[in-house]
Amino acid sequence: MLWLCLHLPDLALEIFTRGAPANDPLVVVCGNGRKRRVALCNAAARGRGIQPDMGLNAAHALAGSLRVCERDREAERVALDCLAAWSGQFTSVVSQTPPQALLLEVAGSCRLFGGLERLKETVSRGVAELGYRASLASAPTPLAASWLAQAGREACVIRRDTLAAVLAPLPLTCLGLTAKHSEMLHGMGVRTIGDCLRLPRDGLARRMGPGLIDILDRALGCVPDPRPAFVVPPVFASSLPLPSAVSTAEGLLFPVRRLLLELEGFLCARDAGTCSLTLSFHHAAAGTTPVGLELVAPSRDAAYLTLLLRERLEHIALPAPVEEVSLHVADPRLLAPRNLDFFAPAQAAEGMLIERLRARLGRDAVRGLGQVAEHRPERAWTYVEPGSGAVVRGGSGRQPLQGSACTLHGAGDRKRPLWLLREPMPLEMHGEHPYLDGVLVLGRERERIESGWWDGQDIARDYFIACSGQGVRLWVYRELAGRHRWFLHGVFA
Amino acid sequence: MNLQDLMLGTEVWRAGAASAFAPGVPSGFPQLDALLPGGGWPPGMLTEILVPSPGIGELQLLLPALARLSHGNRWLAFIAPPHIPYAPALAAAQVDLSRVLLVHPRAATDGLWAVEQSLRAGTCSAVLAWPSTSDARALRRLQLAAEAGGSWGVLFRSGQSADAGSPAALRLRLAPTSGGIDVHILKRRGGWPVGPVSLDLRLDHAVAVPASAGSRA
């Protein structure tokens, strides 16, 4: 067993600041009434002389424009859950040590990620990209790893027999003892864990109770220390409050990217991708702007999703500045693994183009074409989802038929134009003849189409191929009923 | 290594040697293929087709090549077409409809963006576009995008733009004839302007028929 501990010393602060690059002084306070004290402060506040454990009034005196956030334990818990789900991409065993540490069992993952050092670098870089500061330490027992990380020793202990020596200089505060016990040990002149380990076991157990001995034994690996594994939730939901309201697309992209990175880790842990995700921008004045993104093929690539959302965000009008961004993914789908070609450069998947175009132009602007088995020319085609290109049965069924196996009784070997007008265009008449920039010369062949009596949209027309004065071949028809008007319906092009 | 060996290699490009061009997509018209560099429509380049009035047969001219390209695994993109490409006619010309992508952008700038994205993506074998702009800088971008993505970009423009210069690698001007079109090559790589080439598009149904003969109901 090899445990990697991520200790997040500033978690309570970072849940408020990771939505945007921070530059204003901000403090997180706890306690109530006159006992309100600064729990944590950001770098800008520290620059003004604000220190943790300072009274709030004193902090206000030091910084005029101080932003004060109430400590939110529930939000910290949620953030730790999201981070645990994200770190599932590195190992299958993740355990939480509330309030601010995660334990990853990485003995099996070291080789895959290129060694323990490389793995630590990857985790540390990933955590920083999410907007957290973490100190990482690894040790063969979970307690030892968390103590080292908590003390800020970025140590890498692999063997159990060296553990006692590495832990010896750590202060007693790591143990999390009660005030009474730590006072007692302090009075005995015990300052470090090393001092504690040197004391006779039975005497220590008699004075301090069996609890301390048990903790030390577990840290050194003398007794087992089972940890509950974190279970990745089935859906992804995460939100990010912004330190100050944002109204530009560019400003929103920063928190959106952080959320997408979280999502990437979550999906990676589940070996999944997603076809649809929903971003919600929460406004202060009440109300939410939802932004959905639909993908043709499941994906979890944060860089690609950011690219798509950038196109979307540029074309979205926000009614009010955004206070909070949240991301929701309801249906993670299994992502089929893909083999990459060793020699050819990675070929972009064909769906990517469609997704990019749709992200900017809208879903309905990008479509495919399909044929319908129908006699009426304007109903013999339909828009379909790109790539399906099925032949659709006419009438109410609209079930795709088996490609070329069916005969389309509509077209046959008749000449059909390559362009069809959206609506047939009425033609002017010059005496007996239809006219369009000159009298049209009609062809010899006439095709009569009479169909559709069953649904009330029946037509009765004589179609001709005509040639205009400019040499353009047109597909025109004359109504057989009513006023016998002439219409232009297509261009042969 | 002597000169003969060098000449046999692919590193040396000899002016006037058609084989120096990437093999083109056969147009289906042998007379035209003979004049096009690479023996067909040039992939990875921009082709400009100038038509005096839209509808004289410019799409018929491309149809054999489009049918051939549609059986690959890349898209055939129609961006901002003036009318609806009619599915039964395309299918009758052996175009695989499942590869056809229709894009209807709302604004002209979105249209140019869509053309550039489609050319650059590398997942389109041909991109047919009807641009409303004649901005040489925009066209230059499209030519570069076509080279990057290896897509054949076809721009349909009006006949008036023949005099203005263009960064397109191949420029054709079409003129209607009875039953077909005349193709003038205004610009091509590795050769002088030539033409016209008369192509028969077998569209002679509508020619020289007295109007009264057809108009009886």
Image (cartoon, coloured by chain):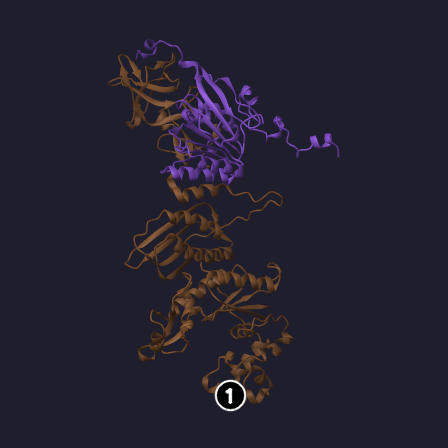
Q: Under tag 1, what secondary structure?
A: helix
- Judging from the image, what is the letter of the chain drawn in purple? B
Q: Position of residue B200 (x, y in %)?
A: 48, 16
Q: Which residue lies furthest to the left in this view?
A: A483
Q: Which of A115 and A27 is in front in this view?
A: A27
Whether A283 is drawn above or below A41: the answer is: above
Any part of residue A205 in sight: yes
Q: Position of residue A392 (x, y in %)?
A: 41, 32
Q: How many marks?
A: 1
Whether A47 is drawn above or below B108: the answer is: below
Chain A on-screen colour: brown
Instruction: Identify the subunit bearing mark 1.
Output: A
Instruction: Please tell me in which quadrant of the rendered image residue B50 appears.
Output: top left
Q: Position of residue A135 (x, y in %)?
A: 52, 69
A227 left or right, relative to B51:
right
Q: Which quadrant is home to the C terminus of chain A?
A: top left
Q: Which residue was labeled with disc 1?
A: A186
Whether A129 is drawn above or below A139: the answer is: above
Residue at left offset 75%, top offset 35% = B1
Residue at left offset 40%, top offset 78% = A53
Tell me the kind of residue under disc 1: His
Residue at left offset 34%, top offset 74% = A60
A355 left or right, relative to A157:
left
Q: Position of residue A393 (x, y in %)?
A: 40, 31
Whether A222 is drawn above or below A339: the answer is: below
Q: Which quadrant is home to the N terminus of chain A?
A: bottom right
Q: Which residue lies furthest to the right in this view?
A: B1
Q: Which of A317 and B205 is in front in this view?
A: A317
Q: Which of A163 and B189 is in front in this view?
A: B189
Any part of residue A234 in sight: no
Tell me the crowding category of disc 1: few under 14, some 14 to 19, or many 20 or more residues within 10 angstroms, Cα based.
few
Q: Which of A202 and A440 is in front in this view?
A: A440
